[in-house]
Amino acid sequence: MNKKVGLLLTRSVLFPSMAFDLLGGMRAGMEDGGITDAEIKTESIGLGADDKMIYTACEQLLINGATVVAGYLNPASAEKLEPLFASANAILIALDAGYHVPTSLTKLPHVFYVSLQGMLCIRAAVAKAIASGKNSFAYTSSFYDSGYRSTFAAHKGIADGAGSVTYNLFTPLKRAELTLQPLTEHLDEVTPDAIFAAFCGDMLEDYFAAAAAGDVFKGRAVYGSSFVGEEQWLAKSTYPGADVQVCVPWSTALVTPANKHFMSVLTRKNTNINIYSLLGWEAGQVAAKALSSADALHDLEGYSFSSPRGEVTLDAATHQCHAPVYDAVVKLNEATGKCLLEVQGESAYTAAQREKLETDINNMSGPMTSWVNAYGCLDS
């Protein structure tokens, strides 16, 4: 009997090929891990915001014989699935952007996390800025990003580095209402050391266009969240008038044998090369390990594998993903007038900032609110 693997499919107008990228990446990653006879069953979970829909989709996949299920989820949604997967003695590979906070880092026996580590990237970028003498920041964010933990990660990182936030600008929900005039006025009055930006998708495109039109960034130090360095949207975005320093989980510009191999395989299979096919590839690698093991729950704890972004480890104590993150710079693409990403090297702040982030998560208490959909998953 063929092995069966499940994949939960999300949708997004920002990343319209997301479901196909996850599927293509996972199929290729499993084959690369030596599993060529597995059947991938899929179920849609929309924007990843409805826990009942997600539970039903997982239940259906498990009933249909899947022993491993992967899905791009809010970690809080993944936590609620532990009893279901324990009952089925199956494994959930929870993929995420790293912009949500787990309610706890307590190990869930049947759930393993593969993350783009967005909050870690933000903290590493802030730490680099502070180390270079930047102590005061004007913080800017889209209405959308403000509903995730990018703001928490940046503000907490700044505070931990004895820095200060001089101003917060959250752009409106309606794109037509975007204006950077309040930011311009603040910069003229206070002159903070740097600007920090947390945006993604078309909101990044609009923000960069507005910054370029008003010369807001000119002559200033600018830092950004990991999705400010997302290459698909950077290629569509007007250069904002100054380079933007970011920390990213991965880039097509990484020059390593594993990344070259990944991009070559996906090109041959006519699959898009982006952060979602990367997550799919890594889910496929983890699934291949589970399917080839006599004791998958044991063997996945502490499991390390070579990924296009470097060595990825599933921490034995928490089942969280540990992977390198990279300093990079958003620069002008001279040929197009748009943006490109230039990778500088692995961040020197990964280990220290990971430890601080884990401390923050473990010490959180009281009510917390956020958007519940998977990051980047939006309707029109």
Image (cartoon, grey):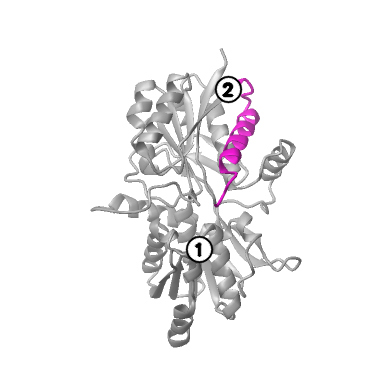
Q: Badge 2 local density, few (<14 within 10 Å), some, or many (20+)?
A: some
CB of mark 2 within 8 Å of CB of mark 1? Answer: no
The x, y position of residue 155, in whole percent, is: 38, 66
180, above or below 153, in the image: below
Outermost residue toward the right? Answer: 335
Outermost residue toward the top? Answer: 1
Q: Is residue 306 visible?
A: no
Q: Is residue 102 visible?
A: yes
Query: 258 or 145: which is nearer to us?
Result: 145
Disc sitting over residue 39 in the figure: 2
> Which residue is at 56% across, 74% downward?
211
- What amino acid type should be assigned to the residue bearing mark 2? Glu
Residue 198 is covered by the magenta coloring: no
**Location of mark 1 (residue):** 125
The x, y position of residue 279, in whole percent, is: 55, 41
> Which residue is at 63% across, 44% downward?
308
Query: 293 or 188: which is nearer to us?
Result: 188
Task: Give the distance between the C-alpha atoms of the residues marked 2 and 1, in whole angstroms.
Answer: 40 Å
Q: In the rendered view, does 274 fall on the left or right side of 196?
A: right
The residue stretch that appears in magenta: 14-38
Q: In the rendered view, does 30 fall on the left or right side of 53?
A: right
Q: In the rendered view, does 53 fall on the left or right side of 116?
A: left
Which badge, 2 or 1, is on the more N-terminal residue? 2
- Locate the N terminus by quadrant: top right
Which of discs 2 and 1 lies nearer the camera? The answer is 2
- What amino acid type should be assigned to the residue bearing mark 1? Ala
The x, y position of residue 313, in whole percent, is: 50, 40
